[in-house]
Image: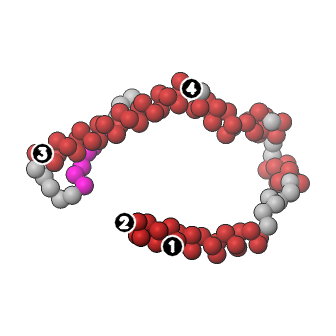
Amino acid sequence: MGINFDSKNRRPSNTYEDMFHAFILGMDSFAYGLIKAAAMIEDGRLEKNIDERYASFESELGKKVRNGEATLEKLAQKASELKAPSIHVSVLISFVKRAPYKFIERFRKTVKKG
């Protein structure tokens, strides 16, 4: 296993100093990512997230799928028995209508401060 590290300048400059800084910044970013990944492993967050994500694999239906006992017909029947999510359409429409205005208000406040 290895890494593919490639650093590039963000602006069109090919001076040795800029290339040096781009390489250092790239390696610092990579090292910071490794530190954070190690922290996620050590404090159990990674394992917890994986367990939560794949919890349904341990359910009765999940075990049948893993063992090859579930057919598409059985899965379709199970899906038709489930209730649809209870998100009211008016809530969604309200969110979609208000989202651009909230962004514009935040932008205006930022401009006034600056």
User: In which quadrant is the C terminus drawn?
Assistant: bottom left
Instruction: Name the quadrant of the N terminus.
Output: top left
Of badges 4 and 2, the one in the foreground is 2
Q: Is residue 95 left or right of residue 86?
A: left
Q: Is residue 34 magenta?
A: no
Residue in the image at 82% along x and 40% along y = 61
Q: CA separation, marks 4 and 1?
A: 39 Å
Q: Which mark is residue 17?
A: 3
Task: State the SS at label 4.
Answer: loop
The stretch in magenta equals 5-10
Residue 26 or 78: which is nearer the viewer? 26
Q: Position of residue 7 (x, y in %)?
A: 25, 45
**Amino acid on which disc 4 is placed:** Asp
Characterize the magenta stretch by its predominant secondary structure.
Answer: loop
Looking at the rendered structure, the kind of residue marked 3 is Glu
The dot on residue 43 is: 4
108 in relation to 27, above or below? below
Is any part of residue 68 visible from this angle?
A: no
- Residue 62 position in % (x across, y down): 77, 38
Q: Mark 1 — residue?
A: 104
Q: Nearer the N terminus, badge 4 or badge 1?
A: 4
Q: Is residue 83 above or below residue 23?
A: below
Residue 66 left/right relative to 113: right
Q: Identify the residue shown where x is 84% and y is 36%.
A: 60
The answer to the question of whether label 4 and label 1 lie on touching residues, with beta carbons closer than 8 A, is: no
Amino acid beneath label 2: Gly
Which disc is residue 114 wearing? 2
Disc with the residue nearer the chain's start (4 vs 2): 4
